[in-house]
Image (cartoon, rainbow, N blue to C red):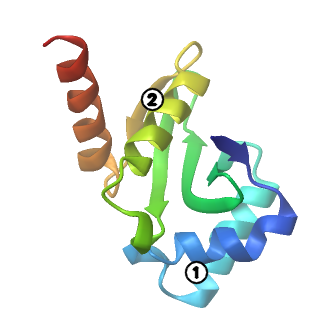
């Protein structure tokens, strides 16, 4: 289930985001977290199952019509279990009534793959 990022989950969120290639540098990672905390157009969600936070997904409101998924990260020991796809689908549901949801340069390929898999399962 997606939960909204809160300051008390900062270390977990930073750990998950550090798996993204462009977030390896600690200073860059701290800037990214600060942006999620202060910018009203940046929204960070964490994927929680039972008592464990296993993934993070970040959405940036680009303009009045576009929401961009800019971060997708899953704990390496829980990858290839469909968590990333679940996060993308849940985030898309949150925004789809008001925004057109897409991925950015780093997440677009995975975002599109999730959409293709969803369409295939709906149209056998």
**What residue is disc 1 on?**
28
Upstream in the sequence, badge 1 or badge 2?
1
Residue furthest to the front in view is 50
Residue furthest to the right in view is 8
Q: Is residue 89 above or below residue 30?
A: above
* Residue lying at 82% horizontally and 57% vertically, measured from the top left: 6
Dot 2: what SS?
strand
Dot 1: what SS?
helix
Residue 118 is situated, as x and y percent measured from the top left of the image, at 28, 25
- Tag count in the figure? 2
Mark 1 touching mark 2, by CB under 8 A? Answer: no
- Quadrant location of the C terminus in the rendered image: top left
- Quadrant location of the N terminus in the rendered image: top right
Residue 117 is situated, as x and y percent measured from the top left of the image, at 22, 31
Q: Is residue 26 above or below residue 38?
A: below
70 sits to left or right of 108:
right
Residue 53 is situated, as x and y percent measured from the top left of the image, at 64, 61
* Residue lying at 40% horizontally and 73% vertically, measured from the top left: 76
Q: Is residue 16 above or below residue 120?
A: below
Pointer 2: residues within 10 angstroms few (<14), some, or many (20+)?
A: many
* Residue lying at 52% horizontally and 88% vertically, measured from the top left: 25
Pointer 1: residues within 10 angstroms few (<14), some, or many (20+)?
A: few
**What residue is disc 2 on?**
101
* Residue lying at 61% horizontally and 26% vertically, measured from the top left: 94
């Amino acid at each position: 289930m997606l939960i909204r990022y809160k300051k008390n989950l900062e270390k977990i969120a930073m750990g998950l985001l550090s798996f993204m290639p462009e977030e390896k540098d600690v200073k860059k990672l701290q800037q990214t977290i600060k942006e999620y905390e202060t910018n009203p157009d940046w929204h960070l969600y964490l994927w929680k199952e039972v008592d464990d936070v296993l993934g993070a997904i970040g959405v940036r409101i680009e303009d009045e019509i576009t929401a961009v998924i800019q971060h997708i990260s899953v704990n390496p020991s829980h990858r290839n279990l469909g968590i990333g796809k679940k996060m993308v689908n849940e985030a898309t549901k949150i925004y789809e009534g008001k925004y057109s949801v897409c991925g950015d340069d780093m997440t677009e390929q995975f975002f599109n793959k999730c959409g293709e898999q969803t369409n295939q399962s709906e149209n056998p």
